Image (spheres, helix red, strand yellow):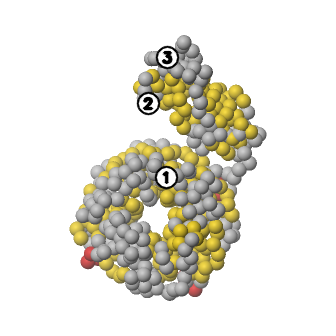
Amino acid sequence: MIRKLLVVAAVGSSHLLAGCGSDPVNPPDTPTIVVLGGNNQQGEPGTQVSQLLRVRVHEGGLPVVGVEVTWEVVAGGGTVEPLSSITDAQGDATARYTLGATVGVNTIRVSAAGASGVATFTATATNSPAKAQLVAEVSIPANYGIHDTHVRDGIAFVAAWNSGIWIYDVGGGDLGGSPESPKKISQYVTSANGVPGGAQVHNSWWFHNPVSGSKRYLFVGQEGPGVIGATSSGDLHVVDVSDLANPVEVAFLRVPSAGVHNFWMDEANQVLYAAWYNGGVVAVDVSGTLTGDLSSRIIAQSFPGGEGASFTWGVMLSNGTLYAADMVQGFFALDPTTLQIRNPAPNVTNRYTSDLWVHGNVGYTGTWGTRGGIRGNAINIWQLGGNGVPTFVRSHEIPGAGTVSDIAVTPDGKLLVATVENGNTVSNGLHVFKRSDPLAPLSAAFSYVSSGLHTGEVAVINGRTYVFGARNPPAPSLMIFDITRLLD
């Protein structure tokens, strides 16, 4: 029997479930429709769900291209756009759905002429917290996947591990890209330099030289194998991106028996500061032309928790002070010229420390893993006093979290953003907080990501504020959220 295909989706309570039609077995050579994405979403009444509703029409596993798919709301209210769409080269068709005005489950029917089978979406309209709007998702090869994304001048540099650096136009290039529609410019795999595991691209920084005016160099971190609190490996690589479409590696820096992690640039003085795990904090002169081995350019090195005891995650320069987050020793203020530590231990060490951010006279540090039976489910909040020295204020816990891996404050200081992983359905994903009181941030939005977000970078593009998040394996992806409306 050949009949019109129906795809049913529940709208109103906002879960989206896929199911089959009345025929348990489809006749051979008959197109079939299945649900690909947009399942089990929820949000506040009258808001648009974050992910597209996506179906696929196939015949014997092969895509059926050019089929008109019609979307119809049949229960619970709400609106679907467009009312009809055409399957693409993969046999896929998509639509956006806005939840009904009242709490409950809604239903959408989708039909495709000549196809058999029934699929069901459900979506639950609830009075749950607001969500950041997911505007784009870019799949990354599961070659471990994705770490940090550096965004500047509308160009995104995605650290895609052994797949290298992927460069996207997200609003500043010649390809017409945007955060809603990223356009890939190029891809480049940096050298392994003999480090076991390959390129292992972890993070990057596009250096804008204020003296020469050039935007030539991209600094790329390689995170090789290591043991937390003890050993690490991986080099700093320098890639010439004068032509974004044709990157070329030109220089590198290795600190013996240590591996680079996150870094920060003092562009005015042409100095790169790098957290080098058990190598502590390293300052590097990056002025002029960079080529070959840069070891002679190391200006200073120090160990926030003491030599042999440090394992530094990240650094940030703010208000004339260099701040360092040390995984095992806590949060430190350093002199940016000498790297002398301004606040020696003791520090807050009940949890492992992860990322850091400073805005004005308040600092934030994330927490990682489990230490002494205490989970890394907190953002530690610090008051910054004279000479930039931090004083611990309190821990803001995120229930259910296992790791608060990345944190950032929007440039206007209104929002604090945190990414969470190793948690559960009420913690994994993107958390946004209002900073009306910087020492007591209030939850403003939460967007659930099942496998968690590893990192999140805030970027302002064409007047709108976005978070570029790294979704964890097994299905790694770059997830781009628009948080502009949360600034109000």
Left or right: where 102 falls relative to 64: right
Residue 419, given in percent of the width and then of the height, sits at 55, 59
Q: Residues within 10 Å of mark 2 (few under 14, many from 20)?
A: some
Q: Residue at x 68, y 29 (%)?
A: 73
Residue 237, given in percent of the width and then of the height, sits at 31, 64
Badge 1 is on which residue? Answer: 471
Q: Residue at x 60, y 77 (%)?
A: 382
Badge 2 is on which residue? Answer: 90
Residue 433, given in percent of the width and then of the height, sits at 64, 62
Q: Nearer the viewer, residue 428 or 88?
A: 428
Badge 3 is on which residue? Answer: 27
Q: Amino acid at mark 2?
A: Gln
Sequence-first disc among 1 and 2: 2
The quadrant of the picture occupied by the C terminus is bottom right
> Mark 2 falls on what kind of element?
loop
Q: Residues within 10 Å of mark 3 (few under 14, many from 20)?
A: few
Outermost residue, top side: 1
Q: CA distance from mark 2 to mark 3?
A: 22 Å
Sequence-first disc among 2 and 3: 3
Q: Amino acid at mark 1?
A: Arg
Q: CA distance from mark 1 to mark 2?
A: 23 Å
Q: Nearer the viewer, residue 361 or 420?
A: 420
Instruction: Say which of marks 2 and 3 sits in front.
Output: 3
- Dividing the picture into quadrants, the one containing residue 46 is top right
Q: Nearer the viewer, residue 130 or 278?
A: 278
Left or right: where 362 falls relative to 32: right
Residue 386, given in percent of the width and then of the height, sits at 58, 86
